[in-house]
Image (cartoon, grey):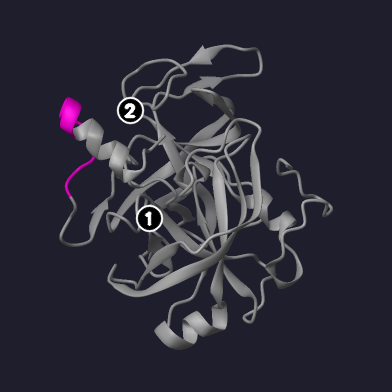
Amino acid sequence: MNKPLLAALATLVITGTGAAPAVAATETDTGGAAPAVKAVNFAGTVSLSNCSGSVIRMPDSEDDDPALALTNGHCLESGFPEPGEVVVDQASSRSFGLLNSAGTRVATLRASKIAYSTMTDTDVAVYQLTRTYAQIRGSYGIDALTLDDTHPVAGTAISVVSGYWKRIYNCSVDGFVYRMREGDWTWKDSLRYTSACNTIGGTSGSPVVDQSTGRVVAVNNTGNEDGQSCTLNNPCEIDESGTVTVRQGINYAQQTYLLAACFGLDNKLDLSAAGCVLPKP
């Protein structure tokens, strides 16, 4: 996984590689990606104690709905969920540093609960916040990022926006992975980046934004660091025939369009809703 920051710093101390020092100003890695149709910036992203994230809304969310924050399941304050474990409606008061377009922290938002989280089939955590979208916009002039409700397409220009490092990685969707295994966890239909998105520890949970629409299509979560096969921090790809492929230095995200079908009126989670195929407790 693109490790939470403390683990990343441990790697840095032990091996001399891993997390880079914090950047003083916004840093953008273009990597030869096509120019963005819409300017992607930090507005609506958040920094966590050990990860990155974003304030998101579903396509049908209303302004008076309680806002939601998106990050990885492996970024939970309680530690990694076990394989097969699904966390639903668990109390939380976690804090999130809200960033403006320049990457300046302008507010602290707080969770009321973990609405949904798992590391089974995907690696995602959705927190419900104590403020509505309208309250956040009214106080800070910042809108939530909208989640796309359709499967992304290979070749799409994307940006991985890390609120922790205040760093934007630009690349393209290289393709999709039938199954990806890392340690004890297996994820379905993972999104693989082209090599320009060389994400590091602390970028876990960053929103992956379609540059042409400005919508979130995935959440950054892992990369193969050392060329090992299917071990922690070294995910492997498994195709439908069972063939295993290792791509050292390549990074990945988990698609998020499946979340849209599972959050309904008032942003309430409904795992029994039509079209909702997220793992259930």
Q: Position of residue 156 (x, y in %)?
A: 49, 47
Q: Quadrant where the C terminus lies?
A: top right
Q: Of the numbered discs in the image, which one, if any, rests on residue 84?
A: none
Tell me the quarter of the picture where residue 171 sits: top left
Q: Quadrant where the N terminus lies?
A: top left
Task: Please give the count of numbered marks on the rendered protein.
Answer: 2
Few, some or many C-alpha atoms within 10 Å of disc 2 (few <14, some 14-19, many ≥20)?
Answer: some
Tell me the quarter of the picture where residue 85 sits: top right
Nearest the viewer among 23 and 59 is: 23
The answer to if 252 sits in the magenta stretch is: no
User: Would you place residue 142 above or below residue 251 in this image?
Assistant: below
- Mark 2 element type: loop
Q: Of the numbered discs in the image, which one, if any, rests on residue 161?
A: 1
Q: Position of residue 218 (x, y in %)?
A: 53, 48
- Mark 1 element type: strand
Nearest the viewer among 49 and 24 is: 49
User: Would you place residue 46 above or below residue 50 in this image?
Assistant: below
Q: Residue at x 42, y 64 (%)?
A: 95
Decide which of tag 2 and tag 1 comes sooner along the chain.
Answer: 1
Q: What stretch of residues is rendered in magenta? A: 13-21
Tell me the quarter of the picture where residue 180 sits: top right
- Please indicate whether residue 243 sits to the left or right of residue 34 in the image: right
Q: Which residue is mark 2?
A: 249
Label 2 close to label 1 by CB (< 8 Å) = no
- Please indicate whether residue 263 sits to the left or right of residue 47 in the image: right
